[in-house]
Structure formats: structure tokens, C-alpha cells
Image (cartoon, rainbow, N blue to C red):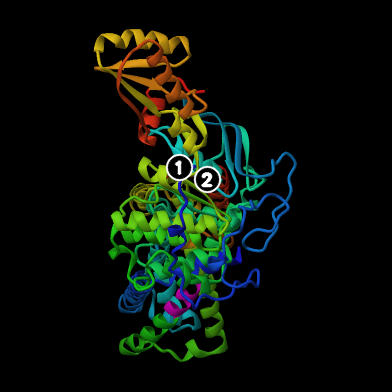
Amino acid sequence: MIRSFRSELLKLSRPSIVLGGGAALAGFTALATVLTFTTATVTIRPAQNGRYPTATFAELAAPHGLTRGFANAAGLVGVLVFVLFLTSMTAEYGQGTIRVLLTRQPRRARLLAGKFIALVAVIAAAMAAAELLSAAIAVPVARARGIATTEWFSGGGLGHAAADYANALLAVALFGTVGFALGVLLRSTPLALGVGLAWLLPLENIVQNSWAGAVHWLPGLLFGAVARGGTTGVSYPAAVGLALGYGACAFLVAALTFLRRDVST
Amino acid sequence: MADRGTSGSTRRVMNTTPTNPASGSRDPLRRPPPAEPTPPAAGQATRRGAVLPSPNGARAGLAIETEGLTKRYGARTVVDGLDLEVPAGVIAGFVGPNGAGKTTTLRMLLGLVSPTAGEGRVLGVALTEPAGYLPYLGALIESPAFYPGLSGQRNLVVQATLAGIDPAWIPAVLGRVGLDERGTDPYKTSSLGMKQRLGIAAALLGEPTLLILDEPTNGLDPAGIRDMRDLLRSLNQDGATVFVSSHLLGEVQQVCDWLVVIDNGRRRYQGPTGNLVAEGDVVVVGCQSAADLPTLEKLLARRGLHATRRGDRLSVDLARVGDINEAVAEISRIAAAEHLILVELSLTKATLEDSYLNLISGNPQP
């Protein structure tokens, strides 16, 4: 598994992934952070249909305000990670490199586990960088809008930053796991991307607009709730529990399929 | 037997090749050929210095053996009860028409596809345990498969890392396929021939005991095909068994001393290449008077020699003849005894292509 892990890291270090993925991640994070602070209001606006309310100045001045933008970005970043994990599998089938991988590491469980853990490790590092970027943007934007930042750098503030990082990482890793599973199951990049993005983006939002209970059950919305540490629609423990269940099921189905299926591409 | 001349020993290995970290030996790519091919049978040390297990049922001297190997996809049988034997230490050709089941067979040997029925062993290890033999095997299946965004060298590093092979071997294998100057080029900008060479280089990583190559000459120019021929001979002389699928029958005839022919998923021939080729040899006989040909044909048939009319000549089949010289003398004696004047008595050597097409077109073979 270690060899598979190291081999996957080598692949992920190629410029197209580092530069392309890094730029997209930085862009999403910067956009979410700027929007979080520029759309903040003095008074409270209630959430509707489980959607996240706009932050108030008081909320953003609280200890957890430093990484509020980062947490908001997690949903968008989750889609990015979903695509990365998905294509990391479908590309192996599309390029035929899956044949090479399996002749070099015939223990399929080790190959799959090493690959998955490498992807998660890269995402963990990228999310840490994204959080730092978000914080670096948040400080001048908050000051420009007159939002106090003194509480952000207290012990409580840094604790919130760590918790936001863990939640965001868990959320994007779950998005990634579902993408990884779809990649293994469908093997075709266009097909898997079409199915996955159609489900996560328009379909879940359409259902959410007509069914209040959607936030309790739909995986994409649950992953988003995990990133935010829970929402007014679904509590954090409930969101984490069910989201982990979805992730575990997705990985199990993918692993069983990968272990048993012929490689005839 | 096919000619395996000394020209095959020409090699391009660089002097800077590192010491094999696994075995501690000097560069095994430069190892002198053994006096006798020594198959890496079960229980013996392999080229990587490891020892393969000695499973029950493994027959000594066979690098690959299958019994009743079958693969079905739904109602379609792609490989149908294939009994395959490839002796260790040979260069074995694997030929058959498109769709005959060659690639599926190779995939089963590599653990990529599970057989529907039958069993087999590679290097003495059961097909159901590919992790037991794949570390000693190098393969190129179908087209070369690499990551387009990485250089050729980086691609090999990825594979070496995954297989636990010291990347210090990479310059040597790139040099061996003539890519020592081009290894850092991005893979996506490589020509088809360079991609093919890189695929061979990847297969050579880890000093494989057994090489399984599917159409290795695809995309190669004539010089590249010649280099490939030399490379296969060189690897074989270094002790590797080579199992190579190809449609270039002229190349197979030149390089391969063992041959497996399949069609519709079934084995049609297995044995020394020379034997199959010799079965297509004929003696062409011409009489001064064409009217004498039917008489001669009958006389030959009485002596067990099968002849067929080809215009104004008779073609005498040598497939079941033990001694060709004796057969030619016998034809001459028969004609002389009947006072038939021969104007031609010549031996025509068949090519593998002749014998293969004869075999595939349905003519009976022993």
C-alpha cells in the first residue's frame, strides 16, 4: 500500500494537477471568502429551505469569523475534489494505465487503498493551504468593511480554525469518495462526470427547493453541512453520521467492484 | 529451429548501469548468456535473485502452462479450453487471426481477467495467485499505456515505485531500447515508435524472468523492428523467456523457436516453429511429357507420397515425410523405374506464412 501511495503522489505532482488544481482551489477559496465578507449585513437574515443565511458583522467578528469564508468555500471545493477523485480513476481506465498498475501491484485492495489515501493526503495539504489563503484574504477585507478581527487570533479563534479545517477536510474527502466510487463503477470520464455533477449540482438543489427534508438525506447537502459544522436545517452530529455512512457505502461498493471486475479495457 | 545467431547479442547497455540492489549482482542485463537455457522453474533462483515457490502440480521447465483455460463473456466464448505450454528459456510466438483470443489469453495470464474455467501456472505459480509471479514478469499488453502529462522517464519512475523496483535501473532500460537521449521528453509528444519503445522499457524494469509482449513491433520502423528482434534475442540469451504475440509472421519465423497458434479461442498448433514450417515444404516435380504426370502421381501415392497437380508440375507434400533427402531420392527412383524423364525435381521451402495460412484455412494438422 505504501508503494501505491508513493506512486500516486508522483502522478499527482505533475504540473497540470498542481497548477490547474491549485489555481482552481485558490480561486474558489478567494471567491467564497470575499463574498462572505462583502455580503455580510449588520442584521440577521433567516435561512430559507436549509440554505445558509448571510453572515452578520457580529458573527464574523466572533472567534470563528476568520475561517468562515474558508468553510463556505468547502462546498465548491468539494465539487472540485469530486472531479479530481473521479478522474483519477476514470483516467486510469481511459488511458489503459489500469492494466499497468494491476500488473505492477496485483493486490488490488492495496492498490486502491494506497491511491485513495494519497488523494486524501494531497487534499489535506491543499486544504491547509486554502485555509491560510482564506485567512490572508479575510483580514484585509474584514478591516475594509469595519469588521473587528481581534477575537480571531485568540486561543478560541485558532481552535475554531482547526475545527473548520477538520470539518472542511472531512466534507471534501466525502465528496471525493463519492467521485472515486463513481469513477470505479462507471470507468468513463464523461459518463461519471455527467452523472455525478448532475446529481450534486442541479438535482439536489431542485429537490431541496421543493422538499425541506432534503438537507437531512441528500449526500451533497449533508457534506456541505459537515463543512459548516452543521446548519440550522441539520445538526452537526446528524450530518456527520449520515455523511460518513454514505462515504463508507460508496467506498465499499467501489472496492468490491474493483476487486472482482475483469480489466478488459 | 529458428536461427538465433550471434548478432542478437548486440546490446546498448550503458556502462553506468547500477548494481542490482535486489540480488547484489552486477548488471544482470549484461550477464553472459548461460550455456544452456536454465528455466526459472519453481524452487529456483530467478533473475531478480528471488526464489519462486514450488506449488503442487507445476511441471518443471514450463514458464507458462494452462489446462482447459476458458473465458466466456455471456454466450460468447472467447477462449475455449486452451491447453498452452511454453517452455522456459525460449522465445515463443503467439499468433492467430484478429479476434482469435490472444489478448484475452494474455490478460488471463496477467491476472487482469479471471478465467471462466480451467487453470494454469505461470513460472510455476497458479493463475489464481498473480501476486506470486507478476513481480518476475514484464508485460506490454496492446498499446503502451502511460500518463501523457509525464515524461517517459517519470512514467517509469511511477511504475518502478509501484512495483518496488529501484528507479536507478531506469537509465539502463531506456538505453536498452534506444531512448537514453529522449527519456525526458513528454510522453504526449512522443512518436508511436517511441511510445512502443518506452512500453518495452517499462516491461524490462525489474529484470523479468518472463516477458509477455503483445504486438511489440506496432508502430516501429524497419530499423526499429530489427532492433526489437535483436533485443528479444539478447534478452533470451540473458535467460529470459519471451512470449510474444505478433501478426508479423516473418519476424516470428526469424525470432521464435516455439510457436502457439490459436484460432477461435482454440489451439491449432503448439510446438517448435521449425516443425510447423517444415510441414509446408514440398518437392516440385516436372516431367518432360505432361501426360506422364497422372502416372507419376499414382506411383507416388502407392509409396505414401501425397502429390497434387499444380499446372504442369506435381507438388509433393513433405508434411509427413521423415527424411526429405530420402523422399527426393525415392521420387527420382520411381520415375527412373517407369522411364519417366524428369525436367524438374526441386525442394521448395515453405514460410511460416504459408504454413500458418494453411493451418488457419482448415487443412488438417497433426
- Name the foreground residue: B164 vs A260: B164
Magenta residues?
A: A124-131
Tell me if residue A44 is in the magenta stretch. no
Q: Tell me what residue is drawn at x 28 percent, y 65 percent.
A: B189
Quickly name the residue at label 1.
Answer: A264
SS for callout 1: loop
Q: Chain of mark 1?
A: A
Task: Decide if residue A23 is in sight here.
Answer: yes
**Do tag 2 and tag 1 residues touch (Cβ < 8 Å)?**
yes
The amino acid type of the residue labelled 1 equals Ser
For label 2, the crowd category at 10 Å Cα-Cα, with few meaning under 14, some 14 to 19 and many 20 or more, is many
Q: Is residue B209 above or below residue A121?
A: above
Tag on residue A125? none
Q: Tell me what residue is drawn at x 48 percent, y 14 percent.
A: B304
Whole-number angstrom distance, CA of label 2 to CA of label 1: 7 Å
Q: Tell me what residue is drawn at x 52 percent, y 26 percent.
A: B322
Tag on residue B112? 2
Q: Position of residue A101 (x, y in %)?
A: 50, 56
Q: Is residue B216 above or below residue A17?
A: above
Left or right, B282 with respect to A171, comes to left
- Name the foreground residue: A148 vs A4: A4
Q: Position of residue A188 (x, y in %)?
A: 38, 48
Left or right, B118 with respect to B95, comes to right
Q: Chain of mark 2?
A: B
The amino acid type of the residue labelled 2 equals Leu
